Every structure is written in C-alpha cells, then in structure tokens.
Amino acid sequence: MGQAIGQSLSFGVGVAISPVPIIAVVLMLATPRGRVNGPGFLLGWIVGLAVLGTVVLLISSGANASSNGGPAKWVSILKLVLGVLLLLVALRQWRGRPHGDGPAALPKWMAALDTVGAGKALGMGVFLSALNPKNLLLTVAASAGIAQTGISAGEQAVALAVFIIIASLGVGAPVGIYFAMGDRATKLLSDMKDWMAAHNAAIMAVLMLVIGAKLIGDGISGLAG
C-alpha cells in the first residue's frame, strides 16, 4: 500500500496547490454566508475527488492495470498521454501569465460568489475538483497509479483516501483558518488570495511542467520495462 500512496502523492500535491479554487473559497468565506458556503465548497471538493477517483479505480482494476507486478502497457501509455497534456497545460498557463505590473485577471464568475447559496457552493466544489481539466488529469493519473500496484480493493480505497486528504489541503486550509481565527483571519486570507491571484499562472505552469515530465518519464520506463 505504501507504493500506491507514493504513486499518488505528487498528484495530490498538484491538486492541492490550485490557486483558483483556493481564491474561490477565500472569497466565499468573506461573504455573509461564509460559515456555510466555505464548508459546503470543501465538502463538494472532497465528493468530486472521491467519485472521480473511485470511478477510475474501478475501470483501471477491471482493465487489469497491474501486470506481473508492474504497470500494464496501457497504463504506461495513459501516463505518456497525460504527461503530454499536462505539458500543454503548463505552456498555456505560462503564455497566459500577466505581464507588467497590472493586476492578474480573475475568472468573471468569481464576481458572483457573494450571491451563491450552499447548494451552488457545493456544486462549485465538485466542479472545480473533479471536472476542472487540470485536476481531472491529475486525479486520473493518481487513481491509475494506485490501481497499477495490484493491491487489494480495501488498500486501494485507503490509498485513494490519502490522496483526497492531501489534495484537499489547499482549499481546506482557508476554511480551517477562518473557523480557528474568526475575524482575525480576514487580513491573512485576503493576503493569501492576492498572492495566489498574482502568481496563479506561474505556480500552475511550473507545477504542471514538473508533474508532466514525471508522468512522461514513468510512461517511458513502463514501456521499456
């Protein structure tokens, strides 16, 4: 099981360091409905990762992701494809980074976060965790990596749970800070939001480059083995 957790660790970190969802949850916490919407968003985030990860695990296990103690050929090919896609995401993020001293542009939908209810907050958490292209690629890679180890279904579930916990630290931290510090958290969360917004593209570009390169290396090693 340790190998399965190791396979998914870097992907969990990649999902956790997602500036846009972190900014979104910070903005929700700053609204009058923050005490409900913040935890609702976090719950949706966890549910999205759990559902997507479970589906990929079931498909991968049914398709024999493990072969003779190593990854099946199709898993190595999948890693190659995912790695290339992540490199393309890195390139797009780098090209889209803000230039000069102007403020970074945030998605237009964030302007309406002060009007969302608990249901929409939960739905946004699901969408940004499981259906966001970057997180979708990373979660698929993590789940396939767990399945390729050939461990039992129970151990796979534990490894997936560890991945989800790690992947939820980014959006979970602001929620924890908000409830632990109360009004004193306002400035800290605001500074966090501003820093994430300013460096979003650079953070994601470097992160996707590193993880994409790792996936391509793992894929080549699996095919050559």
Image (tube, helix red, strand yellow):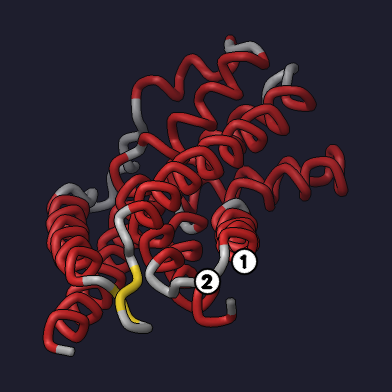
Badge 2 marks a residue whose secondary structure is: loop
Q: Quadrant of residue 187?
A: top right
The x and y percentages for residue 15 are 45, 55
Q: Marks 2 and 1: CB-CB under 8 Å? A: yes
Question: Would residue 51 appear left or right of 221 to someone viewing this image?
Answer: right
Residue 90 visible to the viewer: yes
The residue nearer to you, when weighing 224 against 107, is 224
- Check disc 1 and give the amino acid type: Glu
Question: Would residue 223 appear left or right of 137 to someone viewing this image?
Answer: left
- Check disc 2 and give the amino acid type: Ile
Which residue position is annotated with label 1? 155
Q: Residue at x 30, y 70 (%)?
A: 211
Q: Neighbour class for label 1 at 10 Å: few (<14), some, many (≥20)?
A: some
The x and y percentages for residue 210 are 28, 74
Q: Residue at x 52, y 36 (%)?
A: 48
Which residue position is annotated with label 2? 151
Q: Residue at x 58, y 54 (%)?
A: 164
The x and y percentages for residue 103 are 34, 42
Residue 210 visible to the viewer: no
Badge 1 marks a residue whose secondary structure is: helix
Q: Is residue 47 above or below residue 196?
A: above
Q: Quadrant of residue 223?
A: bottom left
User: Which residue is outermost to the bottom?
Assistant: 225
Q: Is residue 165 above or below residue 129?
A: below
Q: Residue at x 32, y 42 (%)?
A: 104
Question: Would residue 39 appear left or right of 149 to someone viewing this image?
Answer: right
The residue nearer to you, when weighing 42 against 9, is 9
